[in-house]
Image: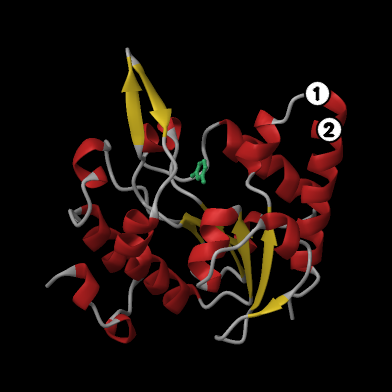
Amino acid sequence: PLVTDLDISQITSLRAVALAARSCLICPMARHATQTVFGEGEPTARMMFVGEQPGDREDQAGRPFVGPAGQLFDRALAEADIGRADVYVTNTVKHFKFIRRGTRRIHEKAGHEEVTACAPWLAAERHLIRPRVLVMLGATAASALLGRSVTIGHTRSRPIPMEDGSTGVVTVHPSYLLRLPGEDARAREYARFVDDLRLAASHLP
Ligand code: URA
């Protein structure tokens, strides 16, 4: 069956979905990327974090958030006292989208087409994990999960009631923090990011 035909209420195992996602060829990115990068974490996690798409390192490792942005994210989680066992991390789009420049592969923003093609995978992850708190890292995740075009500045740092009864929190993407020029700005924005993670954790039952 086409992935878009999947009835997510029939899906009962995270491993089965991850396996099916591995052979997904719905969008062209799937043919260029090394592999599908599915979400990772405890099935009983109460918090789900959703990024944009795997980066170069994630594409090679086949695991989400293992590159520089992932390391910064791990540090922020620890600072916010959020335990790994309570966390499931995934991406809006499960393949790395890039353009080649010589030997380098440069990240390209995932567009509406890829987000739509990948939406059933993310829906299946939400259905199976049933997180109490859903943290959207950056505008791509926020727009995909809130179903409208989102600006981070207007939406971040406040609880958003989600249709499944969970609490949503929008914050910046950790890659944004890495790109900020100037140490002061980076430190300030990093502290705000940790505050957003604390706010998210405060909505756990
Ligand atoms: N950025 C993301 O959005 N996801 C990853 O897995 C890595 C970097």
Image position, residue 115 (x, y; %)? 38, 59
The residue closer to the viewer here, 117 or 123, is 117
- Kind of residue at badge 1: Gly
Which residue is located at x 34 percent, y 46 percent? 95
Q: Tag 2: Cα neighbours inside 10 Å, few (<14), some, or many (≥20)?
A: few
Q: Is residue 107 left or right of residue 13?
A: right
Q: Which mark is residue 73?
A: none
Q: Is residue 45 left or right of residue 95?
A: right
Image position, residue 89 (x, y; %)? 53, 56
The image's colouring method is: secondary structure
Q: Tag 1: Cα neighbours inside 10 Å, few (<14), some, or many (≥20)?
A: few
- Cβ of disc 1 within 8 Å of ligand 1? no
Which residue is located at x 33 percent, y 73 percent? 13
Looking at the image, residue 185 lies above or below residue 44: above
- Cβ of disc 2 within 8 Å of ligand 1? no
Locate the C terminus and report the quarter of the image it occupies.
Answer: bottom right
Which residue is located at x 47 percent, y 73 percent? 126
- Kind of residue at badge 2: Ala
The tally of labels here is: 2
Q: Is residue 99 left or right of residue 183?
A: left
Q: Which mark is residue 182?
A: 1
Image position, residue 142 (x, y; %)? 57, 62
Whether residue 88 is visible, yes or no, is no
Q: Mark 2: which secondary structure?
A: helix
Looking at the image, residue 191 lies above or below residue 91: above
For this orientation, the residue located farthest to the top is 102
Q: Mark 1: which secondary structure?
A: loop
Q: Is residue 58 left or right of residue 183?
A: left
The residue closer to the viewer here, 97 or 79, is 97
The residue closer to the viewer here, 169 or 147, is 147
Check disc 2 and report the residue beneath it. 185
Do tag 1 and tag 2 residues touch (Cβ < 8 Å)? Answer: yes
